[in-house]
């Protein structure tokens, strides 16, 4: 069983201005670190404050207008506006309070400021999410034209109960429950709004808490635990999804991760150590002949050495190859937990593990939607190899080739985003000695 993640929804809730205590209540248990980053993010908080102002203005439009018209009061003198938010925006250089203004002009101003600043928040979302669909929730096309904002106001006021926590977003309100209940529901809803379909559930589905607790119990019941990875028969990005989505305090009890690798495998393994606090040993196994890998033999020898000489009593084996059964059989007193991939592991080996009361789970069950930092560094480092020859290559074809070389499965839109973000923005850099080279804008 898998559950939906809530990272995207937590970010949306913060940006559109949902009350902070509600954001914490709904998302803190699953997205605590993310929320802490959002609370400190100037550009995200700018959009949050502007959205809050726009929503409150809609809710109190007539009352605000009357106070300004008859009592010569402004927003910073009206109790229903957050005065601290206004002060902070003005400290950041935004002119919020203006004299001789009415509600209609403020509505135009707030919408204009949101339009001008929303793209600065695109970095808060992974490349695999269509930023255009998210951006559309914040901007109002043609808002300067007569009647456009009036129509949005009337739509909002007539259907307020269908807006997330009654905060304004630009959409066609429908009775579908909370649009920000989970990432799966949110993505399916906004893609449907644009006559599109989001199909990659691995991006927003994560392993069930029971699966994670079984892993924690295995670690806590062990004297010393190590992770042994058969890199030939494992996906580095899926394994990083496991490490990323488990409790980091629990993972800190693991002695080390040992990568048993072959030079033919994914270059992503070379970068894993930079994205985990667990010590990583990367053992690249040379081949005796090009046709025969001896990674499984080297892994067996390494695990046995760790058991007999280094006092490690428990091993998390990451492999989908049935050869690891020989390793498990050779150490009957050691404790094992096995992580595999659905498409690579047969039922027979699972039955054998069950008969030995060895817990196993799939790395496919863990979310891969929040591992963009590893993918990005692998893709960019691969791109750097091609910079000297880029003038002689088709840049769009190169983008696809880079994903293939990095062994990252991606949609055409995701590859296009990489092309637009990293290849189209390449620039010339001139050295003091007159040399010229291409530079990636990161």
Image (cartoon, helix red, strand yellow):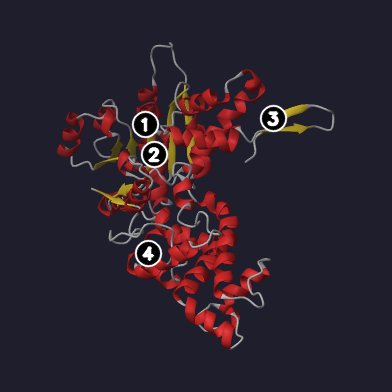
Measured Cα–Cα span from mark 3 to mark 2: 33 Å
Q: Nearer the viewer, residue 270 or 427?
A: 427
Judge whether residue 271 can be spotted in this image. Answer: no
Q: Which-is-in-front pick, marks 4 and 1?
A: 4
**Residue in the picture at 52% in, 38% down:** 376
The C terminus, quarter of image = top right
Q: Few, some or many C-alpha atoms within 10 Å of disc 2 (few <14, some 14-19, many ≥20)? A: many
Q: Mark 2 touching mark 1, by CB under 8 A?
A: yes
Q: Vertical placement of 59 versus 129: above or below?
A: below
Measured Cα–Cα span from mark 4 to mark 1: 40 Å
Q: Vertical placement of 43 versus 218: above or below?
A: below
Task: In the displayed orientation, state which residue is furthest to the right.
Answer: 433
First in residue order: circle 3 vs circle 4: 4
First in residue order: circle 3 vs circle 2: 2
> 192 left or right of 210?
right
Q: Which SS class for mark 1?
A: loop
Q: Nearer the viewer, residue 372 or 115?
A: 115
Q: Few, some or many C-alpha atoms within 10 Å of disc 4 (few <14, some 14-19, many ≥20)? A: some
First in residue order: circle 4 vs circle 1: 4
Q: Which-is-in-front pick, marks 3 and 1?
A: 3
Task: In the displayed orientation, state which residue is furthest to the front.
Answer: 146
For label 3, the residue is: 438
Q: Which SS class for mark 3?
A: strand
For label 4, the residue is: 164
Q: Nearer the viewer, residue 251 or 55?
A: 55
Residue 32: x %, y % from top left:
43, 61
For label 1, the residue is: 234
> 19 left or right of 197?
right
Q: Which-is-in-front pick, marks 3 and 2?
A: 3
């Amino acid at each position: 069983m898998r559950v939906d993640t809530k990272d995207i929804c937590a970010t949306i809730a913060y940006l559109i201005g949902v009350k902070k205590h509600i954001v914490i209540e709904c998302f803190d248990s699953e997205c605590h670190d993310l929320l802490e980053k959002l609370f400190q993010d100037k550009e995200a908080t700018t959009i949050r404050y502007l959205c809050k102002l726009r929503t409150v203005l809609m809710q109190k439009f007539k009352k605000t207008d009357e106070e300004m018209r008859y009592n010569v009061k402004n927003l910073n003198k009206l109790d229903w506006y957050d005065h601290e938010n206004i002060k902070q925006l003005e400290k950041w250089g935004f002119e919020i309070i203006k004299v001789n203004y009415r509600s209609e002009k403020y509505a135009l101003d707030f919408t204009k400021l949101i339009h001008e600043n929303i793209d600065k928040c695109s970095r808060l979302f992974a490349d695999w999410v269509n930023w255009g669909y998210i951006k559309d929730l914040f901007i109002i096309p043609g808002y300067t034209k007569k009647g456009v904002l009036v129509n949005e106001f009337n739509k909002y006021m007539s259907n307020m109960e269908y807006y997330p926590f009654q905060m304004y977003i630009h959409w066609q309100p429908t009775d579908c429950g909370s649009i920000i209940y989970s990432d799966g529901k949110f993505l399916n809803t906004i893609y449907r709004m644009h006559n599109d379909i989001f199909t990659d559930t691995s991006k927003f589905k994560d392993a069930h808490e029971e699966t994670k607790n079984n892993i924690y119990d295995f670690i806590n019941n062990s004297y010393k635990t190590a992770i042994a990875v058969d890199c030939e028969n494992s996906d580095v990005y899926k394994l990083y999804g496991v490490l990323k989505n488990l409790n980091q305090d629990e993972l800190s009890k693991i002695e080390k991760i040992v990568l048993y690798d072959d030079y033919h495998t994914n270059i992503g393994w070379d970068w894993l150590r930079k994205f985990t606090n667990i010590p990583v040993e990367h053992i690249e196994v040379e081949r005796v002949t090009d046709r025969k890998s001896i990674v499984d033999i080297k892994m067996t020898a390494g695990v046995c050495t760790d058991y007999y000489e280094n006092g490690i009593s428990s091993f998390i084996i990451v492999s989908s190859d049935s050869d690891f059964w020989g390793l498990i059989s050779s150490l009957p007193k050691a404790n094992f937990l096995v992580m595999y991939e659905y498409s690579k592991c047969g039922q027979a080996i699972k039955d054998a593990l069950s008969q030995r009361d060895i817990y196993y789970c799939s790395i496919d069950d863990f979310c891969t939607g929040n591992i963009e930092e590893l993918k990005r560094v692998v893709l960019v480092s691969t791109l750097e190899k091609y910079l000297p020859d880029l003038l002689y290559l088709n840049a769009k074809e190169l983008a696809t080739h880079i994903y293939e070389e990095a062994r990252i499965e991606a949609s055409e839109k995701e590859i296009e985003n990489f092309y637009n973000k990293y290849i189209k923005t390449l620039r010339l850099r001139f050295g003091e000695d007159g040399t010229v080279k291409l530079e990636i804008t990161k």
